[in-house]
C-alpha cells in the first residue's frame, strides 16, 4: 500500500480577503496546504514560517538578511513573490540559499485602464462632481475640462502596459509621443506613434504617463529640471513606480500651476501606508499629507492592478512557480543576483 504524500505547506503573508478568495479558487487544481497570515513577513514574524516548505510574500514584506537566514536554516528553499516588484529582497544573501520567483505580469490592460481612469477623472473633475451632487450642489462652476481629442500624450515606457495605454489613447484621437530605451520601431510605425527624446516628450506633451521600470537611470526622472521643460498645466500620471517622481518637486509644481494636475497610483514612500487603513490616524508623512490636500491631485492606493482577471493571473502564476520548484526543473520566473536576473534562461537551467 502506497504511503500518501502530504501536500506542501505554504506560509502566505500579508493576506487580504481577496487574496484568500483568488488563491483558494486556483489552488483547487494544485492542492497545496496554504496558511494565511495577516501579518507582514519581517524579522519579528519570520518564526511563523517554521514547519513550512514555501513562503509567499508581497511588496511590503521585508525580506532582508535575517529573514532569509532564518528561512534557510529552517529548510525553506523558496520565496514566491506574488508581485512583479522585488526591491524588498536581499538577493545577495538569498543566492545559493533560497530561490526567489515572482509574477512578472498580471494584466497590462488593468494598469493601462486605471491610468486612463485617472486622466478622465482629473480632466473632467469626476471625483469632485460626485461629492458636489451628493451634497445637493449641482453647480458645474470650476469643473471645466478639455477635449482629449487632438491633444498630445507622452508615454514613457512602451512595454505591454504602455502599448495597451497607447491603443486606448489612440481611440480618443490623441497624438502619441513615446520614449523607451529600447524603442519598438515596428510597433510605432504600425500604430502611428512617434519616438522622441525625453526632453522633446516633456516639451510637447499635454499629458505624460509613466510606465517604465525603476532603475538608477529612471530614479526621480521627474524632477525640477524635467518639470521646467514641460508645458504649463501639464497632467502627469504615474501608475508605475513611486520613485520615478521626486515628490517634493512635484508638489511645488502643483502649487505653482506648472503642473495642472497629477494622478498617482504609487508614491515613493508608499510601503508605510498603501494597502493599510489609516482612516482613524494622522498621516505623519508630510509629503503624502500635502499631496492629499492639494485640489489638483488624485491619489489611489496602488490599485491599478486590482481586477478580477489580474488576481486570477497572480494566483495561477504564483502556484505554477511553486509547482515548478518542487518538480525540480527550470524556474522561468526566478530572480537571481548572480545571473543579473537572467538565471541562465538561454539554457533553461537553474543557476544553482
Image (cartoon, rainbow, N blue to C red):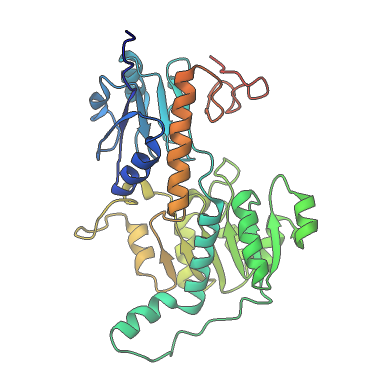
Above or below, 65 against 163 in this view is above
Residue at 42% from the left image edge and 67% from the top image edge = 298
How far across and how far down the image is residue 132, in percent? 34, 83
At x 40% / y 27%, what residue is drawn?
Answer: 79
Residue 93 screen position, x and y as percent: 43, 20
Q: Residue furthest top?
A: 1
Q: Quadrant of residue 307?
A: bottom left
Side of 312 where 279 appears, left or right: left
| 67 left or right, relative to 179 | left
- Residue at the image position 38 percent from the left and 39 percent from the top: 58
Q: Where 265 sits versus 119, above or below?
A: above
Residue 114 shows in the view: yes
In this picture, residue 186 sits left or right of residue 45: right
Residue 136 pos. (x, y %): 29, 89
User: What residue sits 47% from the left and 51% below the top?
Assistant: 309
Visible residue check, residue 101: no
- Residue in front for this viewpoint, 269 or 34: 34
Extreme-left residue of the structure: 280
- Residue 90: image quadrant is top left
* 37, above or below 273, in the image: above
Q: Quadrant of the N terminus?
A: top left
On screen, residue 164 above or below 42:
below
Q: Nearer the viewer, residue 323 or 148?
A: 323
The tally of labels here is 0
Please, which residue is most extreme toward the front here?
Answer: 1
Amino acid at each position: 500500500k502506497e504511503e500518501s504524500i502530504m501536500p506542501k505547506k505554504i506560509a502566505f503573508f500579508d493576506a487580504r480577503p481577496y487574496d484568500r478568495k483568488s488563491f483558494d479558487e486556483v489552488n483547487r487544481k494544485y492542492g497545496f496546504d496554504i496558511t494565511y497570515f495577516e501579518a507582514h513577513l519581517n524579522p519579528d514574524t519570520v518564526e511563523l514560517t517554521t514547519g513550512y516548505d514555501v513562503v509567499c510574500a508581497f511588496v511590503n514584506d521585508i525580506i532582508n538578511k535575517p529573514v532569509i537566514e532564518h528561512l534557510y536554516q529552517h529548510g525553506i528553499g523558496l520565496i514566491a513573490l506574488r508581485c512583479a516588484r522585488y526591491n524588498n529582497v536581499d538577493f545577495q544573501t538569498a543566492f545559493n540559499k533560497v530561490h526567489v520567483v515572482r509574477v512578472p505580469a498580471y494584466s497590462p490592460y488593468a494598469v493601462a485602464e486605471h491610468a486612463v481612469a485617472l486622466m478622465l477623472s482629473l480632466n473632467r473633475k469626476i471625483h469632485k462632481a460626485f461629492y458636489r451632487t451628493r451634497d445637493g450642489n449641482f453647480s458645474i462652476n470650476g469643473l471645466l475640462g478639455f477635449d482629449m481629442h487632438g491633444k498630445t500624450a507622452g508615454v514613457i515606457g512602451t512595454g505591454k502596459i504602455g502599448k495597451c495605454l497607447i491603443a486606448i489613447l489612440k481611440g480618443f484621437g490623441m497624438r502619441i509621443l513615446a520614449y523607451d530605451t529600447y524603442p519598438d520601431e515596428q510597433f510605432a510605425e504600425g500604430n502611428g506613434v512617434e519616438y522622441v527624446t525625453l526632453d522633446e516628450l516633456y516639451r510637447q506633451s499635454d499629458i505624460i504617463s509613466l510606465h517604465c521600470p525603476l532603475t538608477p537611470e529612471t530614479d526621480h526622472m521627474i524632477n525640477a529640471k524635467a518639470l521646467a521643460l514641460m508645458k504649463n498645466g501639464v497632467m502627469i500620471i504615474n501608475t508605475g513606480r513611486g520613485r520615478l517622481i521626486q515628490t517634493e518637486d512635484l508638489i511645488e509644481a502643483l502649487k505653482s500651476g506648472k503642473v495642472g494636475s497629477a494622478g498617482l497610483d504609487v508614491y515613493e514612500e508608499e510601503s508605510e501606508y498603501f494597502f493599510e487603513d489609516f482612516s482613524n490616524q494622522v498621516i505623519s508623512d508630510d509629503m503624502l499629507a500635502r499631496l492629499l490636500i492639494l485640489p489638483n491631485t488624485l491619489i489611489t492606493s496602488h490599485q491599478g492592478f486590482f481586477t478580477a482577471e489580474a488576481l486570477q493571473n497572480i494566483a495561477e502564476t504564483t502556484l505554477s512557480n511553486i509547482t515548478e520548484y518542487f518538480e525540480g526543473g527550470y524556474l522561468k520566473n526566478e530572480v537571481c543576483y548572480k545571473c543579473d536576473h537572467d538565471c541562465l534562461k538561454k539554457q533553461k537551467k537553474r543557476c544553482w
